[in-house]
Image: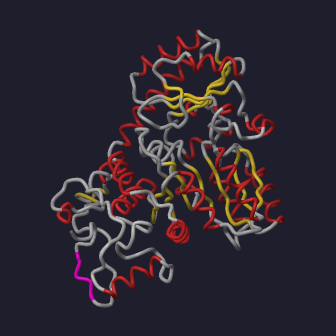
Amino acid sequence: MTDHKNPETEADLTGATPRRRPKADVLEVGGRKLSPSTLMMGHAFDPMLSEGSLKPPIFLTSTFVFENAAAGKRHFEGVTGKRPGGADGLVYSRFNGPNQEILEDRLGIWDEAEDALVFSSGMSAIATLMLALVKPGDVIVHSAPLYAATETLIGRILGRFGVTFLDFPAGATEAEIEAVVAKAKAQGNVSLIYLESPANPTNALVDIEAVSRVRDRLLGESKPPIAIDNTFLGPLWQQPLRHGADLVVYSLTKYAGGHSDLVAGGVTGAKAWINPIRMMRNTIGTICDPNTAWMLLRSLETLELRMSRAGENAEKVCAFFRDHPKVESVGYLGFLQDGTRQADIYKRHCTGAGSTFSLYLKGGERESFAFLDSLKIAKLAVSLGGTETLASCPAAMTHLSVPDQRKQELGITDNLVRISIGVENADDLIADFDQALKAV
Protein backbone atom coordinates (compact mmCIF):
# COMPACT_ATOMS: atom_id res chain seq x y z
CA MET A 1 0.00 0.00 0.00
CA THR A 2 1.36 3.41 -0.90
CA ASP A 3 1.53 6.53 1.23
CA HIS A 4 -1.99 7.77 1.95
CA LYS A 5 -1.25 11.21 0.54
CA ASN A 6 1.71 10.75 -1.78
CA PRO A 7 0.25 10.23 -5.27
CA GLU A 8 3.70 10.85 -6.67
CA THR A 9 5.61 8.00 -5.05
CA GLU A 10 8.53 7.95 -7.46
CA ALA A 11 10.84 9.58 -4.93
CA ASP A 12 14.23 10.17 -6.46
CA LEU A 13 17.52 9.24 -4.85
CA THR A 14 17.88 12.67 -3.25
CA GLY A 15 14.79 12.08 -1.14
CA ALA A 16 12.97 14.99 -2.78
CA THR A 17 9.88 16.28 -1.01
CA PRO A 18 6.80 14.32 -2.12
CA ARG A 19 3.40 15.87 -2.58
CA ARG A 20 1.66 16.37 0.75
CA ARG A 21 -1.91 16.18 -0.58
CA PRO A 22 -3.56 13.87 -3.10
CA LYS A 23 -4.42 15.04 -6.59
CA ALA A 24 -8.04 14.21 -5.75
CA ASP A 25 -8.32 17.05 -3.25
CA VAL A 26 -10.94 19.63 -4.26
CA LEU A 27 -10.80 22.93 -2.38
CA GLU A 28 -13.21 24.91 -4.54
CA VAL A 29 -15.93 24.30 -7.10
CA GLY A 30 -16.94 26.80 -9.77
CA GLY A 31 -14.90 29.50 -8.09
CA ARG A 32 -16.59 28.87 -4.74
CA LYS A 33 -14.31 28.09 -1.78
CA LEU A 34 -15.63 24.99 -0.07
CA SER A 35 -16.70 25.24 3.57
CA PRO A 36 -15.08 23.20 6.36
CA SER A 37 -18.22 21.07 6.79
CA THR A 38 -17.90 19.95 3.15
CA LEU A 39 -14.13 19.40 3.26
CA MET A 40 -14.47 17.13 6.30
CA MET A 41 -15.88 14.43 4.01
CA GLY A 42 -12.70 13.78 2.03
CA HIS A 43 -9.99 16.40 2.38
CA ALA A 44 -6.39 15.07 2.45
CA PHE A 45 -7.32 11.50 1.51
CA ASP A 46 -7.36 9.79 -1.89
CA PRO A 47 -9.37 6.51 -1.83
CA MET A 48 -7.36 5.21 -4.79
CA LEU A 49 -4.27 5.09 -2.61
CA SER A 50 -6.02 2.74 -0.17
CA GLU A 51 -7.61 0.13 -2.42
CA GLY A 52 -10.57 2.44 -3.17
CA SER A 53 -11.72 2.59 0.45
CA LEU A 54 -14.21 5.46 0.86
CA LYS A 55 -12.96 6.14 4.38
CA PRO A 56 -9.31 6.03 5.49
CA PRO A 57 -8.31 2.65 6.93
CA ILE A 58 -6.89 2.54 10.44
CA PHE A 59 -3.12 2.21 10.00
CA LEU A 60 -2.08 0.03 12.94
CA THR A 61 1.68 -0.09 12.49
CA SER A 62 4.60 1.07 14.56
CA THR A 63 6.94 1.84 11.66
CA PHE A 64 6.89 2.63 7.94
CA VAL A 65 9.06 1.40 5.04
CA PHE A 66 11.11 4.06 3.22
CA GLU A 67 11.18 4.26 -0.59
CA ASN A 68 14.98 4.38 -0.46
CA ALA A 69 17.78 5.24 1.95
CA ALA A 70 18.03 8.86 0.79
CA ALA A 71 14.32 9.37 1.46
CA GLY A 72 14.76 7.89 4.92
CA LYS A 73 17.55 10.34 5.65
CA ARG A 74 15.46 13.27 4.51
CA HIS A 75 12.49 12.16 6.59
CA PHE A 76 14.71 12.02 9.67
CA GLU A 77 16.05 15.49 8.92
CA GLY A 78 12.51 16.69 9.45
CA VAL A 79 11.91 14.52 12.52
CA THR A 80 15.12 15.64 14.25
CA GLY A 81 14.68 19.32 13.45
CA LYS A 82 17.55 19.73 11.00
CA ARG A 83 14.85 20.89 8.62
CA PRO A 84 11.69 22.57 10.02
CA GLY A 85 8.20 21.37 9.24
CA GLY A 86 8.38 17.73 10.21
CA ALA A 87 9.03 14.66 8.10
CA ASP A 88 8.24 14.67 4.38
CA GLY A 89 6.92 11.14 4.68
CA LEU A 90 5.90 8.51 7.17
CA VAL A 91 8.61 7.42 9.61
CA TYR A 92 7.49 5.97 12.94
CA SER A 93 4.21 6.18 14.84
CA ARG A 94 5.66 8.30 17.64
CA PHE A 95 6.26 11.01 15.02
CA ASN A 96 3.44 10.71 12.49
CA GLY A 97 1.01 8.38 10.79
CA PRO A 98 -1.58 8.46 7.99
CA ASN A 99 -4.62 8.82 10.26
CA GLN A 100 -3.01 11.53 12.37
CA GLU A 101 -1.82 13.51 9.32
CA ILE A 102 -5.23 13.44 7.64
CA LEU A 103 -6.79 14.57 10.93
CA GLU A 104 -4.29 17.41 11.30
CA ASP A 105 -4.98 18.63 7.76
CA ARG A 106 -8.73 18.68 8.42
CA LEU A 107 -8.47 20.18 11.89
CA GLY A 108 -6.47 23.13 10.59
CA ILE A 109 -9.18 23.97 8.06
CA TRP A 110 -11.67 25.07 10.72
CA ASP A 111 -9.32 27.74 12.10
CA GLU A 112 -7.79 28.63 8.71
CA ALA A 113 -4.49 27.69 10.36
CA GLU A 114 -1.14 27.18 8.64
CA ASP A 115 -0.56 23.92 10.48
CA ALA A 116 -2.00 21.63 13.15
CA LEU A 117 -0.92 18.88 15.54
CA VAL A 118 -2.91 16.24 17.42
CA PHE A 119 -2.13 14.79 20.84
CA SER A 120 -3.14 12.01 23.21
CA SER A 121 -5.21 14.40 25.36
CA GLY A 122 -5.99 18.07 25.79
CA MET A 123 -3.57 18.28 28.70
CA SER A 124 -0.79 16.57 26.73
CA ALA A 125 -1.31 19.23 24.05
CA ILE A 126 -1.04 22.02 26.63
CA ALA A 127 1.93 20.44 28.39
CA THR A 128 3.80 19.82 25.14
CA LEU A 129 3.16 23.40 24.01
CA MET A 130 4.48 24.84 27.26
CA LEU A 131 7.50 22.55 27.41
CA ALA A 132 8.39 23.60 23.88
CA LEU A 133 8.01 27.34 24.38
CA VAL A 134 8.92 28.04 28.02
CA LYS A 135 12.33 27.65 29.66
CA PRO A 136 13.45 27.84 33.31
CA GLY A 137 13.24 31.34 34.74
CA ASP A 138 10.63 32.53 32.23
CA VAL A 139 7.34 34.21 33.09
CA ILE A 140 3.95 33.10 31.80
CA VAL A 141 1.09 35.60 31.68
CA HIS A 142 -2.33 33.98 31.65
CA SER A 143 -6.01 34.77 32.00
CA ALA A 144 -7.97 33.42 34.96
CA PRO A 145 -9.61 31.14 35.70
CA LEU A 146 -8.06 28.32 33.71
CA TYR A 147 -8.96 24.65 33.65
CA ALA A 148 -7.72 23.37 37.01
CA ALA A 149 -5.16 20.96 35.53
CA THR A 150 -3.71 23.82 33.43
CA GLU A 151 -3.33 25.96 36.55
CA THR A 152 -1.64 23.02 38.28
CA LEU A 153 0.73 22.54 35.36
CA ILE A 154 1.77 26.20 35.36
CA GLY A 155 1.88 26.82 39.09
CA ARG A 156 3.09 23.52 40.53
CA ILE A 157 4.84 21.57 37.77
CA LEU A 158 6.59 24.31 35.77
CA GLY A 159 7.11 26.16 39.04
CA ARG A 160 9.58 23.44 40.03
CA PHE A 161 11.80 24.63 37.21
CA GLY A 162 11.75 28.30 38.14
CA VAL A 163 8.88 29.32 35.86
CA THR A 164 6.68 32.00 37.41
CA PHE A 165 3.33 33.42 36.34
CA LEU A 166 1.09 36.45 36.63
CA ASP A 167 -2.57 36.47 35.69
CA PHE A 168 -5.46 38.80 34.98
CA PRO A 169 -9.21 38.07 35.21
CA ALA A 170 -10.86 36.86 32.01
CA GLY A 171 -12.97 40.00 31.61
CA ALA A 172 -10.10 42.44 32.26
CA THR A 173 -9.92 45.74 30.42
CA GLU A 174 -7.01 46.57 28.15
CA ALA A 175 -5.55 48.83 30.84
CA GLU A 176 -5.75 46.03 33.42
CA ILE A 177 -4.13 43.58 31.01
CA GLU A 178 -1.36 46.08 30.27
CA ALA A 179 -0.61 46.56 33.96
CA VAL A 180 -0.15 42.80 34.45
CA VAL A 181 2.00 42.38 31.33
CA ALA A 182 4.18 45.37 32.34
CA LYS A 183 4.71 43.82 35.78
CA ALA A 184 5.55 40.47 34.19
CA LYS A 185 8.06 42.12 31.85
CA ALA A 186 9.80 43.72 34.81
CA GLN A 187 9.90 40.33 36.53
CA GLY A 188 11.63 38.44 33.70
CA ASN A 189 11.38 37.11 30.16
CA VAL A 190 7.72 36.67 29.17
CA SER A 191 7.82 33.63 26.88
CA LEU A 192 4.11 32.82 26.64
CA ILE A 193 0.72 34.48 27.01
CA TYR A 194 -1.87 31.79 27.65
CA LEU A 195 -5.60 32.43 27.51
CA GLU A 196 -8.78 30.45 28.02
CA SER A 197 -11.95 31.95 26.60
CA PRO A 198 -14.66 31.35 27.62
CA ALA A 199 -13.08 30.58 30.97
CA ASN A 200 -13.75 27.24 32.61
CA PRO A 201 -16.15 27.14 34.41
CA THR A 202 -17.37 30.75 34.69
CA ASN A 203 -17.90 31.32 30.94
CA ALA A 204 -16.20 34.74 31.14
CA LEU A 205 -14.69 35.95 27.84
CA VAL A 206 -11.16 37.26 27.27
CA ASP A 207 -10.56 40.20 24.91
CA ILE A 208 -8.05 38.53 22.57
CA GLU A 209 -7.63 41.65 20.47
CA ALA A 210 -6.75 43.73 23.54
CA VAL A 211 -4.22 41.11 24.67
CA SER A 212 -2.66 41.14 21.20
CA ARG A 213 -2.34 44.94 21.20
CA VAL A 214 -0.76 44.94 24.65
CA ARG A 215 1.67 42.19 23.65
CA ASP A 216 2.74 44.09 20.53
CA ARG A 217 3.07 47.34 22.46
CA LEU A 218 5.02 46.10 25.46
CA LEU A 219 6.72 42.95 24.19
CA GLY A 220 7.28 43.87 20.56
CA GLU A 221 10.93 42.85 20.54
CA SER A 222 10.43 39.31 21.82
CA LYS A 223 6.75 39.06 20.82
CA PRO A 224 5.92 35.84 22.71
CA PRO A 225 3.10 33.76 21.23
CA ILE A 226 -0.49 34.12 22.38
CA ALA A 227 -2.03 30.69 22.86
CA ILE A 228 -5.68 30.18 23.71
CA ASP A 229 -7.76 27.24 24.87
CA ASN A 230 -10.76 27.43 22.54
CA THR A 231 -12.47 24.23 23.68
CA PHE A 232 -15.76 25.79 24.86
CA LEU A 233 -16.61 27.61 21.60
CA GLY A 234 -14.32 26.31 18.92
CA PRO A 235 -13.98 25.83 16.19
CA LEU A 236 -17.55 26.73 15.17
CA TRP A 237 -18.41 29.70 17.38
CA GLN A 238 -14.99 31.36 17.82
CA GLN A 239 -11.85 31.51 15.67
CA PRO A 240 -9.12 33.19 17.75
CA LEU A 241 -6.46 33.29 15.00
CA ARG A 242 -8.56 35.99 13.35
CA HIS A 243 -8.31 38.16 16.46
CA GLY A 244 -4.59 38.07 17.22
CA ALA A 245 -3.89 34.64 18.72
CA ASP A 246 -0.95 32.65 17.35
CA LEU A 247 -1.92 29.20 18.63
CA VAL A 248 -5.28 27.60 19.40
CA VAL A 249 -5.54 24.68 21.82
CA TYR A 250 -8.36 22.13 21.95
CA SER A 251 -9.45 19.28 24.09
CA LEU A 252 -10.62 17.26 21.08
CA THR A 253 -12.33 15.02 23.63
CA LYS A 254 -15.10 17.60 23.73
CA TYR A 255 -16.97 19.00 20.71
CA ALA A 256 -14.57 17.70 18.06
CA GLY A 257 -14.93 14.13 19.34
CA GLY A 258 -18.44 14.82 20.50
CA HIS A 259 -19.50 11.32 21.59
CA SER A 260 -17.74 10.96 24.96
CA ASP A 261 -15.85 7.92 23.68
CA LEU A 262 -12.29 9.21 23.18
CA VAL A 263 -9.62 11.44 24.70
CA ALA A 264 -7.43 13.65 22.50
CA GLY A 265 -6.03 17.15 22.08
CA GLY A 266 -5.05 19.50 19.30
CA VAL A 267 -3.09 22.66 18.54
CA THR A 268 -3.52 24.79 15.42
CA GLY A 269 -1.74 27.94 14.36
CA ALA A 270 1.26 29.52 12.68
CA LYS A 271 3.99 27.18 11.40
CA ALA A 272 6.67 29.21 13.17
CA TRP A 273 5.19 28.20 16.54
CA ILE A 274 3.88 24.77 15.54
CA ASN A 275 7.36 23.58 14.47
CA PRO A 276 8.98 23.67 17.96
CA ILE A 277 5.86 22.07 19.46
CA ARG A 278 6.10 19.27 16.88
CA MET A 279 9.75 18.74 17.83
CA MET A 280 8.80 18.43 21.49
CA ARG A 281 5.99 16.02 20.62
CA ASN A 282 8.42 13.90 18.59
CA THR A 283 10.70 13.71 21.61
CA ILE A 284 8.24 12.95 24.41
CA GLY A 285 5.73 10.98 22.32
CA THR A 286 2.44 12.76 23.04
CA ILE A 287 0.86 12.13 19.61
CA CYS A 288 -2.59 10.54 19.58
CA ASP A 289 -2.99 6.93 18.45
CA PRO A 290 -4.30 5.88 14.98
CA ASN A 291 -7.64 4.56 16.24
CA THR A 292 -8.43 7.78 18.10
CA ALA A 293 -7.44 9.82 15.04
CA TRP A 294 -9.75 7.68 12.88
CA MET A 295 -12.64 8.21 15.32
CA LEU A 296 -12.04 11.97 15.26
CA LEU A 297 -12.14 11.96 11.45
CA ARG A 298 -15.56 10.37 11.76
CA SER A 299 -16.70 12.96 14.29
CA LEU A 300 -15.49 15.98 12.33
CA GLU A 301 -17.95 15.07 9.59
CA THR A 302 -20.88 15.93 11.89
CA LEU A 303 -19.23 18.67 13.97
CA GLU A 304 -21.26 21.53 12.56
CA LEU A 305 -24.55 19.60 12.82
CA ARG A 306 -23.94 18.54 16.42
CA MET A 307 -22.75 21.90 17.66
CA SER A 308 -25.59 23.74 15.94
CA ARG A 309 -28.25 21.49 17.48
CA ALA A 310 -26.66 21.69 20.92
CA GLY A 311 -26.48 25.48 20.64
CA GLU A 312 -30.17 25.72 19.74
CA ASN A 313 -31.06 23.47 22.67
CA ALA A 314 -28.95 25.53 25.08
CA GLU A 315 -30.73 28.73 24.10
CA LYS A 316 -34.11 27.18 24.99
CA VAL A 317 -32.89 25.61 28.23
CA CYS A 318 -31.21 28.81 29.42
CA ALA A 319 -34.39 30.78 28.73
CA PHE A 320 -36.14 28.39 31.15
CA PHE A 321 -33.43 28.74 33.82
CA ARG A 322 -33.30 32.53 33.61
CA ASP A 323 -36.81 33.03 34.98
CA HIS A 324 -36.78 30.24 37.56
CA PRO A 325 -37.15 31.40 41.21
CA LYS A 326 -34.52 28.95 42.48
CA VAL A 327 -31.85 30.22 40.06
CA GLU A 328 -29.63 33.11 41.10
CA SER A 329 -28.14 33.72 37.63
CA VAL A 330 -27.21 32.02 34.37
CA GLY A 331 -23.75 32.48 32.89
CA TYR A 332 -24.85 32.06 29.29
CA LEU A 333 -23.23 34.13 26.56
CA GLY A 334 -26.57 34.66 24.84
CA PHE A 335 -27.76 36.71 27.83
CA LEU A 336 -24.97 39.28 27.92
CA GLN A 337 -26.33 42.76 28.51
CA ASP A 338 -25.81 45.28 25.71
CA GLY A 339 -23.26 47.93 26.55
CA THR A 340 -21.21 45.72 28.89
CA ARG A 341 -17.61 44.80 28.20
CA GLN A 342 -18.47 41.10 27.96
CA ALA A 343 -21.14 41.85 25.35
CA ASP A 344 -18.64 43.92 23.38
CA ILE A 345 -16.08 41.08 23.38
CA TYR A 346 -18.78 38.61 22.38
CA LYS A 347 -19.90 40.70 19.40
CA ARG A 348 -16.32 41.07 18.14
CA HIS A 349 -15.06 37.54 18.77
CA CYS A 350 -17.95 35.07 18.69
CA THR A 351 -20.52 33.82 16.21
CA GLY A 352 -22.58 31.81 18.71
CA ALA A 353 -23.25 31.52 22.43
CA GLY A 354 -22.26 27.87 22.68
CA SER A 355 -23.94 25.08 24.61
CA THR A 356 -21.91 25.00 27.84
CA PHE A 357 -22.83 27.47 30.56
CA SER A 358 -22.63 28.16 34.28
CA LEU A 359 -25.77 27.96 36.42
CA TYR A 360 -25.74 29.65 39.82
CA LEU A 361 -28.41 28.24 42.13
CA LYS A 362 -29.75 30.04 45.18
CA GLY A 363 -27.96 28.36 48.06
CA GLY A 364 -24.70 26.43 48.27
CA GLU A 365 -23.27 22.94 47.96
CA ARG A 366 -26.33 21.27 49.50
CA GLU A 367 -28.62 22.80 46.87
CA SER A 368 -26.19 22.04 44.05
CA PHE A 369 -25.89 18.41 45.08
CA ALA A 370 -29.66 18.03 45.49
CA PHE A 371 -30.17 19.36 41.97
CA LEU A 372 -27.49 17.11 40.45
CA ASP A 373 -28.68 14.00 42.29
CA SER A 374 -32.24 14.49 41.01
CA LEU A 375 -31.41 14.62 37.30
CA LYS A 376 -32.93 11.83 35.19
CA ILE A 377 -31.88 12.62 31.60
CA ALA A 378 -28.81 14.79 32.11
CA LYS A 379 -25.87 12.77 33.41
CA LEU A 380 -23.86 13.71 36.49
CA ALA A 381 -20.40 13.65 34.94
CA VAL A 382 -17.50 15.97 34.12
CA SER A 383 -16.55 16.88 30.53
CA LEU A 384 -18.63 18.70 27.95
CA GLY A 385 -19.41 18.94 24.25
CA GLY A 386 -20.87 15.47 23.83
CA THR A 387 -24.13 14.37 22.27
CA GLU A 388 -25.55 13.89 25.76
CA THR A 389 -26.24 16.56 28.37
CA LEU A 390 -23.81 16.60 31.32
CA ALA A 391 -23.86 18.49 34.61
CA SER A 392 -21.32 18.82 37.42
CA CYS A 393 -20.30 20.97 40.39
CA PRO A 394 -16.85 22.45 39.55
CA ALA A 395 -16.00 23.62 43.08
CA ALA A 396 -16.36 20.07 44.39
CA MET A 397 -15.13 18.24 41.29
CA THR A 398 -13.01 19.60 38.41
CA HIS A 399 -11.69 22.56 40.45
CA LEU A 400 -11.48 20.84 43.85
CA SER A 401 -7.68 21.21 43.86
CA VAL A 402 -7.90 25.01 43.48
CA PRO A 403 -7.40 26.78 46.84
CA ASP A 404 -10.68 27.96 48.41
CA GLN A 405 -9.73 31.63 48.44
CA ARG A 406 -8.80 31.58 44.76
CA LYS A 407 -12.04 29.80 43.89
CA GLN A 408 -13.99 32.56 45.63
CA GLU A 409 -11.99 35.25 43.80
CA LEU A 410 -12.71 33.57 40.46
CA GLY A 411 -16.42 33.00 41.07
CA ILE A 412 -16.12 29.22 41.38
CA THR A 413 -18.59 28.96 44.23
CA ASP A 414 -20.40 26.00 45.81
CA ASN A 415 -23.67 27.01 44.17
CA LEU A 416 -22.18 26.91 40.66
CA VAL A 417 -23.30 24.05 38.43
CA ARG A 418 -21.70 23.67 34.99
CA ILE A 419 -24.01 22.30 32.33
CA SER A 420 -23.16 21.11 28.83
CA ILE A 421 -26.26 20.70 26.68
CA GLY A 422 -26.40 17.84 24.18
CA VAL A 423 -28.54 17.03 21.15
CA GLU A 424 -31.56 15.55 22.96
CA ASN A 425 -35.05 17.04 22.62
CA ALA A 426 -34.94 20.45 24.29
CA ASP A 427 -38.40 20.13 25.88
CA ASP A 428 -37.39 16.81 27.45
CA LEU A 429 -34.32 18.47 28.95
CA ILE A 430 -36.39 21.34 30.34
CA ALA A 431 -38.77 18.86 31.96
CA ASP A 432 -35.81 17.11 33.57
CA PHE A 433 -34.29 20.33 34.90
CA ASP A 434 -37.69 21.49 36.15
CA GLN A 435 -38.23 18.37 38.25
CA ALA A 436 -34.65 18.50 39.54
CA LEU A 437 -35.10 22.10 40.71
CA LYS A 438 -38.18 21.04 42.66
CA ALA A 439 -35.90 18.83 44.75
CA VAL A 440 -33.76 21.80 45.74
User: What is the x, y in percent for residue 112?
Assistant: 44, 58
Q: What stretch is highlighted in magenta?
A: 8-12
Q: Give the residue at x 70% y 53%.
A: 142
- Quadrant where the C terminus is found in the figure: top right
Left/right of residue 171 with respect to residue 404 in the rendered view: left
Left/right of residue 231 with respect to residue 182 in the rendered view: left
User: What is the x, y in percent for residue 62?
Assistant: 36, 66
Q: Toward which corner of the image does residue 220 lie, by quadrant?
A: bottom right
Question: Who is closer to the viewer here, 420 or 58?
Answer: 58
Q: Toward which corner of the image does residue 25 lie, by quadrant?
A: bottom left
Q: Residue furthest bottom?
A: 13
Question: Who is closer to the viewer here, 373 or 106?
Answer: 373
User: What is the x, y in percent for residue 23?
Assistant: 23, 68
Q: Give the residue at x 52% y 18%.
A: 375
- Quadrant where the N terminus is found in the figure: bottom left
For residue 165, above or below residue 207 = below
Label tally: 0
Determine if the magenta segment contains residue 11. yes
Q: Give the residue at x 71% y 60%.
A: 158
Q: Give the residue at x 62% y 27%.
A: 417
Left/right of residue 123 with respect to residue 396 in the rendered view: left
